Amino acid sequence: MFFAVISAFALNSWSENRNDKISEEKILKEIKNGIELDLNDFNSNIKGNKLSLRANDYFKDLVSGKMVKQDSAKIFYITLFRDYVPIINRSGYESLKASGMKTVTNDSLRLQIISLYDYYYSIIDLLEFHSDEMKSYPNYFKPINSLLNPYMNFDKDNNFLNFNTPIKISEIQKKEILSYLWKIDYNREYKLKRYQLIIDAMEKVKTNIQKELSD
């Protein structure tokens, strides 16, 4: 009778441990898949910000009287003010919180996951959603456009084509535009550094999750 009770207890404990391990594996895979989606989105935003930096250089040349390619005017005017909003996949982390943080038995990995979602992701969330200073379109489109629109050409369907050059604005107006472009440039460079910092943390967590799943 004693051995039957012990065997039943051991079997029940094994079953619970097995279910816990299956639950942990499922959540870790979900978090890993979410990070992979986030990496694609973040890398796309990095490319977008780099294109916008090229647009910034284009308009510095334009208002400084340098020769620019008119066939690039449209795409650069669109991307100059574009803000790139990240879409963060939190479903795996929410599943972990719902099941209990201790579901991830590796203490180091658990802390890395918490740090990624509660610290690193909050950095980009703050920059892109909550910091008015970092937003290009609402801050700079109207003042720059008001100075450049007299030199803008449109097609028969009223779509923007290019600029009449040279841009004949005063030295004060040129400095005004250049000051806006400098701030846009500074903000984008700052964002790119933060994106890289976060991507490094994402890659580390992804690698360690894969190692945990393999082990």
Image: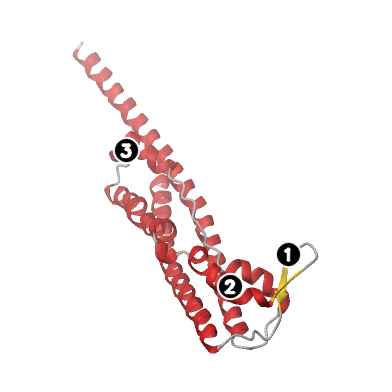
Query: Which image quadrant for residue 75?
Result: bottom right
Q: Which of 111 and 16 is in front in this view?
A: 111
Circle 2 sits on which residue? 146
Secondary structure beneath label 1 = loop
Indicate the amino acid at tag 2: Ser
Tell me whether circle 2 and circle 1 mark residues in contact (CB < 8 Å).
no
Which residue is at 31% across, 31% downward? 17
Specify few, some or many for label 2: CA neighbours under 10 Å numbering under 14, 14-19, or 20 or more: few
Q: Which of 193 and 27 is in front in this view?
A: 193
Query: Which image quadrant for residue 155?
Result: bottom right
Q: Nearer the viewer, mark 3 or mark 1?
A: 1
Query: Which image quadrant for residue 102?
Result: top left
Circle 3 sits on which residue? 103
Of the image marks 2 and 1, the number of the one nearer the N terminus: 2
Specify few, some or many for label 1: CA neighbours under 10 Å numbering under 14, 14-19, or 20 or more: few
Indicate the amino acid at tag 3: Thr
Task: Tell me residue 198's x, y (percent).
Answer: 40, 61
Secondary structure beneath label 3 = helix
Which residue is at 33% across, 55% downward? 119
Q: Nearer the viewer, mark 2 or mark 3?
A: 2
Task: Tell me residue 48's x, y (percent).
Answer: 56, 65
Spatial distance from mark 3 to mark 1, Cα to Cα?
56 Å
Query: Outermost residue, top direction?
Result: 1
Spatial distance from mark 2 to mark 3, Cα to Cα?
57 Å
Secondary structure beneath label 2 = helix
In this picture, is 31 found above or below 153? above
Q: Nearer the viewer, mark 2 or mark 1?
A: 2
Circle 1 sits on which residue? 159
Indicate the amino acid at tag 1: Asn
Q: In which quarter of the image is the N terminus?
A: top left
Task: Tell me residue 50's x, y (percent).
Answer: 55, 71
In this picture, is 115 found above or below 8? below
